[in-house]
Image (cartoon, rainbow, N blue to C red):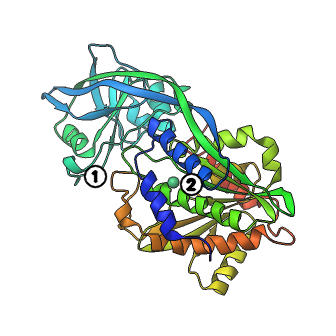
Amino acid sequence: MGVCGKREFELLNKIGFVRYGGSEEELKAANMLLDELNTLGVKGELEPFKVTYYDVKKVKFEVLEPFCQEYTVRGYGLSGNTPAEGLTAEFEYVEQAEKVNLLNAKGKIVMVNGNVTTTMYKNIVEAGAVGFVSFSGTAIDDVELTDIEMRTLKEDYLKYGKIPGITMRVRDAMEMVKAGACKVRMTLEQEEGETDSHNVLAQIEGTEYPDEVVTFVAHYDSTPFSNGVYDNGGGTVIIMEMLRHYLENPPKRTVRFVWFGSEERGLLGSKYFVANHEEDLKKMVLLINVDMAGPIIGSDRAYVTADMSLKHMVDYLASEVGHPIISVQDVYSSDSTPFAEKGVPAISFARFGAAGSAPGHNRYDLIEHLSAESLQHTSDFIEVFSDRIINSVVFPVPQEIPENMVKAVDKYMHRNQPKK
Ligand SMILES: [Zn+2]
């Protein structure tokens, strides 16, 4: 075996800082990947694409009646501004924001359960509400030890209109409902605009079938407040190690590498890529995605968004080499899906932490929950799988997405969309 978990772990340590899509830190991480490529003698490329950006200058949320209380909240990104003196309105808790919840919502600031889905947002705006409140966390959170989630109104929400919103802690939300809060003031001031996020690209030409391309991908961005080592520094360093492996062992087919930016913001890097590399997609015979890896305790997974025969191949190979892995034919919530939607067969590898062992998407995605041995374990199988596939005499993966996966991909890509 050529791949080295220790080397992967060292690179993981370097890139283990918060790298939110479109931020300076994300670009810093992209440049670190470019440096790494340079060290290996490979010319990498940064591919910029536009993402929205916001900066909350001021946010405040007060209950005015029947009691006075100010709560710590976070402004909802890209939800616009209130008047400078704040937006004072009646308050109502509207649960899941079904139409029946919203009969009296006109002119009010409404609070919904948890996060605001597209359907909830559409209903709220159409009901004439003037502001919204979402909440995050759990009732048992220690205020000092948790962050209120940073949330953003995505583009497909804005077609229904724009009203300002905030996110608060679930315990505070409960307190408000219990005490019968009925009048509130929301103050939100934010700067909104566009900035660049980046994909990082590299390639090694195939020796025998250069026009058949196997593409390794992993997203290197993180969610806010998260060091993103488990999700997805792990995948980031594993595919870097695969690149090193194919430099040392020239592949029969061309291998491409793409590290995506802004995955956590809604697969923005991979969506940009598939929309802007139509010609390249035709040559792509398989996509190998790695998203989430490294937990000390856990289990390896493979999500096959391709013909069932590829799942069987994974199972047989796992038995042959003695590697435990749970495989399914399914969609994986990651960058593989936009490719599958375009007809590129995809497989996503991951190692999921055992329940409770490796938190993600928050400040507890920490390197101490991960190990070099774990990365080595997962990488060893990806290496043997990739070698078999990439150096096949005849490429074994059917170049089509089966009907059941077409449906599953379609459902995933259009989830949360309100029914017409
Ligand atoms: Zn991820």
Neighbor class of circle 2 (other Cα within 10 Å; few <14, some 14-19, many 20+) is some
Q: Does the closest atom of ligand 1 sit within 8 Å of the Cβ of label 2?
A: no
Residue 213 drawn above or below residue 20: below
Q: Is residue 105 visible?
A: no
Q: CA distance from mark 1 to mark 2?
A: 24 Å
Residue that numbered label 1 is attached to: 138
Q: Quadrant of the N terminus?
A: bottom right
Residue at horizontal 44 percent and vertical 34 percent from the top: 152
Contact between labelled residues 2 and 1, with CB atoms less than 8 Å apart: no
- Between residue 171 and residue 229, name the one nearer to us: 229
Say which amino acid is labelled 1: Thr
- Residue 310 occupies quadrant: bottom right
* Direction from residue 95 to residue 235 in the image, left or right: right
- Per the rendering, the mark at residue 333 is 2
Which residue is found at the position 56% from the left and 52% from the top? 36
Q: Secondary structure at mark 1?
A: loop
Is 69 situated above or below 378? Answer: above
Q: Position of residue 266 (x, y in %)?
A: 55, 43
Where's residue 270, x and y in %? 64, 45
Give the left or right position of residue 54, taking residue 71 as reference.
Answer: right
Q: Residue at x 61, y 35 (%)?
A: 48
Residue type pointed to by label 2: Ser
Q: Nearer the viewer, residue 183 or 352?
A: 352
